[in-house]
């Protein structure tokens, strides 16, 4: 959220845009974490480029552990959709952030 909002502040965005971008940043960040947790469970170390299943070994509370894989996937999709909706009032100016949302949702590493 901080990177999205700080960029908006530095670009001189008004308060309403900053509020929208703050909401977007919070949602996209949480979706990123949920997907990272899912990938830790479903991918291999070779594919991820880091140790897979490390969170399980460290007994971390993760979204798949708490909600299950299907519910975690659904929650990530809901957050991405809500983040996209936050950007709607910004029109074409939000195109790069919409692309980021798509990347976060579809990433496999």
Image (cartoon, rainbow, N blue to C red):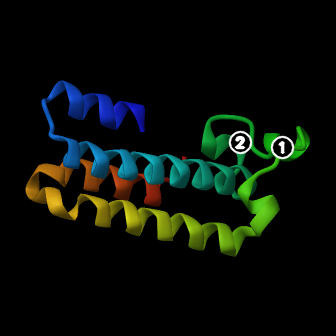
Residue 109 relative to residue 18: left or right: right
Instruction: Report the residue at 15% width, 37% height from top.
Output: 13
Picture disc at residue 45: 2
Q: CA distance from mark 1 to mark 2?
A: 18 Å
> Residue 67 location in percent, x, y?
76, 67
Q: Residue at x 39, y 69 (%)?
A: 81
Q: Residue at x 71, y 42 (%)?
A: 45
Residue shown at 71%/49% (left/top)?
40
Q: Secondary structure at mark 1?
A: loop
Q: Is residue 23 above or below residue 4?
A: below
Q: Nearer the viewer, mark 1 or mark 2?
A: 1
Q: Is residue 31 visible?
A: yes
Question: Along the line of sight, which residue is nearer the eye, 23 or 68?
Answer: 23
Could you tell whether 37 is left or right of 2 in the image?
Answer: right
Percent coordinates x, y for residue 37 in the rendering: 68, 51
**Can you identify the residue that label 1 sits on?**
60
């Amino acid at each position: 959220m901080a990177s999205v909002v700080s960029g908006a502040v530095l670009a001189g965005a008004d308060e309403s845009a900053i509020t929208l971008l703050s909401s977007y940043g919070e949602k996209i960040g949480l979706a990123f974490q949920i997907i990272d947790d899912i990938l830790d469970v479903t991918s291999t170390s070779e594919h991820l480029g880091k140790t897979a299943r490390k969170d399980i070994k460290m007994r971390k509370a993760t979204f798949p552990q708490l909600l299950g894989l299907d519910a975690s996937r659904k929650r990530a999709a809901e957050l991405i959709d809500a983040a996209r909706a936050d950007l709607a009032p910004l029109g074409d100016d939000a195109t790069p952030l919409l692309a980021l949302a798509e990347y976060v949702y579809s990433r496999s590493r």
